[in-house]
Image: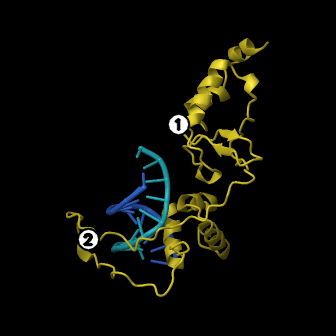
Chain colours: A yellow, B cyan, C blue
Amino acid sequence: MSWTDDRVATLTKMWGEGQSASQIAKELGGVTRNAVIGKVHRLGLSNRATSGNKGGAKPKAAAKPAAARAAKPTAKAKPKAAPANAAPKPVLPPRKAIIPAGQPLPPQPSANEISPEALATVREVEKKAKKIGLMELTERTCKWPIGDPATEEFWFCGLPSEPGKPYCEAHVGVAFQPMSARRDRRR
DNA sequence: CCCTGATTCGC
DNA sequence: GCGAATCAGG
């Protein structure tokens, strides 16, 4: 894959929106997050919006040559990274949350369709939910939606998901109920 | 361990 | 110019 104008445009846009390098890489496909970061730097848009940067930017300490690492990483001499830049994320408010495609998400189950025990467990877990936004979802975060997408009261569980599953343990439990449980619940 | 970006340097 | 390897940190 090469950096076509198109892909660069996507990269620039997403980076500007505060998307992480890995997310951008996934979106683009065919590149790793390293590639994305490398490109970002080459494009010179590494520091995300240096806010309130008045007067003059000072060069800070000149970058250490760090030639010491030439041959062997024997010594751990590290030049200490960079011109720290506190990045104030733009972060767009999750107004109309949109559930990402990919794996089909089961609809928000009505409370009265879940067994009291499971419901209790879920409620408990949801207290500990990380309340992450759409942007924070990854392959390993529970994608269980909590709340009403039409309101501000909406977020995703965000707890560590079970390997290969879209949800955390508790939510997997209510999402994939055995047939028997379903029948028993019937009234 | 999961993730983040930053830097270096052989290609 | 590119990006894997590596580093530093949350």
**Left or right: B7, with A5 as reference point:** left
Quadrant in which the N terminus of chain A appears = bottom right
> Which residue is nearer to you in this view: A113 or A44?
A113
Q: Nearer the viewer, residue A64 or A130?
A: A130
Q: Which mark is residue A163?
A: 1
Depicted A30 relative to depicted A157: above or below: below
User: Please, which chain is the residue tagged with disc 1 on?
Assistant: A
Callout 1: helix, strand or loop? loop
Quarter of the figure with residue A183: top right
Letter of the chain that mark 2 sits on in the rendering: A
Q: Earlier in the sequence, mark 2 or mark 1?
A: 2
**Residue type at tag 2:** Arg
Task: Looking at this view, name the residue that lies furthest to the left.
Answer: A75
Q: Point out residue A159 in the picture as x, y percentages from the top left corner.
A: 54, 39
> Which numbered marker is on residue A69?
2
> The disc labelled 1 sits on which kind of residue?
Pro
Instruction: Give the side of residue A59 with respect to residue A144, left or right.
Output: left
A125 horizontally vs A63: left or right: right
Q: Are marks 2 and 1 in contact (CB under 8 Å)?
A: no
Q: Position of residue A27 (x, y in %)?
A: 63, 59
| Mark 1 closeness class: few <14, some 14–19, many ≥20 residues within 10 Å | few
- Asked which secondary structure carries label 2, the reply is helix
Q: Which mark is residue A180?
A: none
- Identity of the residue drawn at 23% across and 73% down: A68
